Amino acid sequence: MKKLVVLTGAGISAESGIKTFRDADGLWEGHDVMEVASAIGWQKNPALMLDFYNKRRKQLQEVQPNRGHFILAELEQYFDVHIITQNVDNLHEKAGSTNVLHLHGELLKARSTKDENYILDWENDLNEQHRDLKGFPMRPHIVWFGEAVPAMEDAIDLAEQAAIFVVVGTSLQVYPAASLMHYTRPEIPIFYIDPKPASVIELANALEIIPHNGSDGLKILQNRLTKLI
């Protein structure tokens, strides 16, 4: 099977009712993103950030995957599909995708503030009293602004191996994720699905823009790719 690598962003989850912050002047659920999504914010007010992510967990449990998520899972019948997502939700997994790499962490996990390899599944509220085995506080397993992206090397490896590369629902404004398409081999096709696609420069590949939302754009792409098999 050909390796189909897909980079997904907030746009695909927005169709399921999960709010983004880039469409609202930098506010995320009424908060300045630097207050609730940065290393500085955690140092300044961990209680605020814990409350914020506890509410996001509850919201996530109330939403379901949309058609775009299910189409990506269905494509595993025909391709070796690997999803690299900037999203911290679990909607790809709930839809049935089996190879999902979370660049920016996972909302339903928590990790030690001391040992970054101590990570637990965590669907319930997280508070300042929760500690790891050595007594250090636990924090949301999220990559915040100002922090390194540990999964980036794995994502680059996938981009380099791709036979087809697809970008869905991302503004291509968040780095280093936005640079991934530039690691692909120049002879492979790239498809960019977004109702308001960003400009893409200095790309050697054949690029096709599908100016639709994730569900509609992925349906168009699914029909096209499966006819070529």
Image: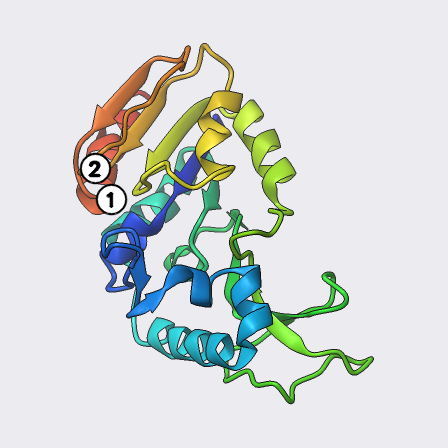
Q: Nearer the viewer, residue 31 or 168?
A: 31
Q: Name the residue under label 1.
A: 214
Q: Which of 172 and 153 is in front in this view?
A: 172
Is 59 rendered above or below residue 7?
A: below
Q: Quadrant of the C terminus?
A: top left
Instruction: Answer with left or right where residue 228 lies relative to residue 107.
Output: left
Q: In which quarter of the image is residue 211?
A: top left
Instruction: Let me know if residue 170 appears in the view.
Output: yes
Query: Which disc, if any, is residue 178?
Result: none
Label 2 is placed on what type of residue?
Gly
Question: Do residues under tags 2 and 1 come within 8 Å of each other at their CB atoms?
Answer: yes
Q: How many marks can you see?
A: 2
Question: What is the x, y in percent for residue 34?
Answer: 44, 60
Q: Name the residue under label 2.
A: 217
Point out the residue furthest to the right here: 134
Label 1 is placed on what type of residue?
Gly
What residue is drawn where x is 35% and y is 44%? 72
For the residues labelled 2 and 1, the Cα–Cα distance comes to: 5 Å
Is 132 rendered above or below residue 191?
A: below
